[in-house]
């Protein structure tokens, strides 16, 4: 957004330099911050009309967005809850039909039903050709919405991949209950191993066929294998 200037390096957005073409780019970008800075004494509709005048656009699209998010245009910002103020920021970010939508923790303060409605708006926006750049600690939301992910640790990107490729290489959580002696699962590639009586809880990275073949030779009474969540993958990358 060119609010903070880097010491080095450059950013290219839509074929334009983020600093040299900052003003032109802002006409193409919608932005929803985690903590929107709105005018306390303005109403919701006054914010919408202001953005429409500044951007030289019709304010009508904001009406549908308000309806979708169950947001009234009459209250002043100071009377709105944190969640409703977030709805205002979402409307202002989407009403300009931007080519790029930058979102920073956009569902903060929204209840699960409204989060689902907001996700539906994003899918429609993406279907119409828009690009979403989302920063979020809500990994379930990332898993549901994103096609590509990057994980940042201490200011460095430690992995970047399509979500599907990341999942193909991901962990599997395994729970196996044995009727006899529990084998040495560490030799089979098991990590984060926990034993509770005859039941072993562990994780396997990548191809699970090897562990399946090994377990087929063992006296297994019960077996459950699930793909690890994005949160599990995130925690492993951070360790």
Image (cartoon, rainbow, N blue to C red):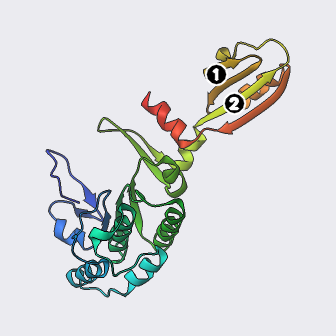
Image label count: 2
Labelled disc at residue 190: 1
Residue 130: image location, x then y, percent: 42, 70
Q: Identify the residue shown where x is 82% and y is 29%.
A: 222
The residue wearing badge 2 is 174
Q: Are marks 2 and 1 in contact (CB under 8 Å)?
A: yes
Q: Which of marks 1 and 2 precedes in the sequence?
A: 2
Residue 42 vs residue 201, the one in the foreground: 42
Residue 7: image location, x then y, percent: 13, 44
Residue 167 vs residue 12, the one in the foreground: 167
Q: Identify the residue shown where x is 46% and y is 32%.
A: 237
Residue 192 vs residue 82, the one in the foreground: 82
The local crowd at label 2, few if under 14, some if 14 to 19, many if 20 or more residues have their Cα within 10 Å, is many
Labelled disc at residue 2: none
The local crowd at label 1, few if under 14, some if 14 to 19, many if 20 or more residues have their Cα within 10 Å, is some
Left or right of 42: which side holds 212? right
**SS type, badge 1:** loop
Foreground: disc 2 or disc 1: 2
Q: Identify the residue shown where x is 35% and y is 77%.
A: 95
Residue 97: image location, x then y, percent: 36, 77
Left or right of 164: which side holds 211? right
Residue 220 vertical placement versus 48 (above, below): above
Q: Which image quarter is the N terminus in?
A: bottom left
């Amino acid at each position: 957004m060119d609010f903070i200037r880097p010491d080095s390096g450059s950013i290219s957005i839509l074929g334009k330099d983020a600093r040299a073409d900052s003003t032109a780019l802002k006409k193409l970008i919608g932005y929803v911050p985690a903590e929107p800075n709105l005018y306390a004494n303005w109403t919701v509709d006054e914010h919408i009309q202001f953005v429409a005048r500044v951007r030289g656009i019709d304010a009508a699209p904001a009406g549908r967005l308000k309806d979708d998010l169950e947001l009234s245009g009459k209250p002043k910002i100071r009377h709105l809850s944190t969640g409703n103020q977030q709805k205002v920021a979402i409307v202002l970010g989407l009403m300009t039909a931007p080519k790029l939508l930058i979102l920073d923790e956009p569902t903060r303060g929204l209840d699960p039903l409204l989060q689902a409605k907001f996700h539906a708006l994003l899918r429609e926006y993406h279907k119409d050709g828009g690009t979403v750049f989302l920063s979020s600690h809500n990994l379930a939301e990332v898993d549901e919405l994103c096609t590509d992910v990057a994980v940042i640790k201490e200011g460095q990107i430690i992995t970047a991949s399509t979500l599907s490729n990341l999942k193909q290489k991901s962990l599997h959580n395994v729970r196996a209950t044995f009727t006899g002696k529990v084998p040495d699962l560490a030799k089979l590639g098991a990590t984060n191993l926990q034993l509770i009586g005859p039941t072993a809880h562990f994780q396997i990275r990548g191809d699970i066929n090897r562990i399946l073949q090994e377990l087929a030779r063992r006296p297994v009474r019960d077996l459950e294998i699930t793909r690890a969540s994005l949160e599990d993958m995130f925690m492993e990358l951070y360790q």
